[in-house]
Amino acid sequence: MEYSINTFEKLLEECRINNKKIYEIMQEKEAYDLEITVETVREKVYKNILAMKAAIKNGINSKEKSYSGLCGDDCYKLKEKYSKVPSLFGKLYEKITMYSLATTEENLRMNKIVACPTAGSCGIVPAVIIALSEEKELTKDDEINALITAGTIGFVVSSKVAMAGAVAGCQAECGVASMMAAASVVQILGGNEFQIVNAAALAIKNLLGLTCDPVAGLVEIPCVKRNAFLAVHAITAAELALADIESKIPPDEVIDAMVQTGQLMSPLLKETSKGGLSLTKSGILLNERLGK
Ligand code: SF4
């Protein structure tokens, strides 16, 4: 089916008119645009789920450092900590934080990950979907529905702004990933379409202005740990949305604010490594040590 979806308002309208879920609208759109069947779309999505699971499985058992030597053993340390002192927030929280680190560390080892929406922010969506899948014993179809829902959020945002730290700061990478993850949680937990979009809005609304200032120009500091923080942030947004707590600024307007904030942000804080953390005393020292 042909759908023109470039705003959240339009997406919700299509859901209402056609009495369909967000993932149903998007899988039909994708099938129409690519001239393939809905089943093929879903199988393609499932391949990504399998790749996400593989990255988590590999990453959680590794403490191999990145080529720079700056990062690579944070997931291992967290796993060790949980084995001795469990998290205050239980098993799901433990998995979300570990899986996000596991995936992003696989990225900096140059191993296979799913960019969702980008490589730097690749840990957030998989951590949330796979951890919830394990803890709630989701089916293959549940996982696919969740990832298509997450992807739809990214798709709508991308119609207004490029998802790149160089364009709009980290709000456009980890921020969007957190939106996508929040939406997928609401889908998994049976929320309605408005709650799904509202969760995404709540997530990004509280990340506006998030800068991109990677130390030594590497997607490592602060990127790796940021994935763990924003995966948890997504859960908060989803819980609020499921309680019908609304963003008083409508989702499309929140995205407009995000775009404007990105435009107002100094280029020094947009992936140039010329400001913020990368220009701290320690950031400069690390940069020099790496011969950059
Ligand atoms: S800080 Fe910059 S490089 Fe790192 S994940 Fe965010 S946008 Fe990407």
Image: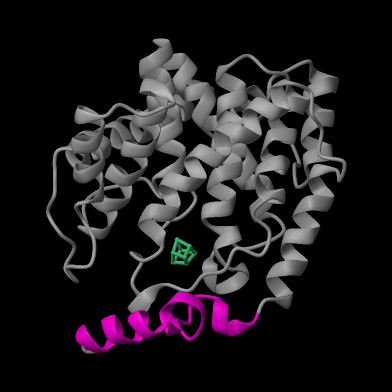
Q: Residue at x 41, y 63 (%)?
A: 222
Q: Is residue 51 visible?
A: yes
Decide: is 111 above or below 271: above
**How far across and how far down the image is residue 236, in percent?**
61, 33
Task: Quadrant for the N terminus, please.
Answer: top right
The region drawn magenta spans 266-290
Q: Main secondary structure of the magenta part?
A: helix
Task: Quadrant for the C terminus, please.
Answer: bottom left
Decide: is 8 above or below 279: above
Is residue 140 on the magenta stretch?
A: no
Relative side of 110 to 247, left or right: left
Q: Residue at x 79, y 51 (%)?
A: 254
**How far across and how far down the image is residue 93, in percent?**
41, 29
User: Based on the displayed image, in which of its 4 quarters is residue 57 positioned?
Assistant: top left
Relative side of 216 to 124, left or right: left
Front residue of 13/224: it is 224
Q: Is residue 33 visible?
A: no
Decide: is 142 above or below 218: above
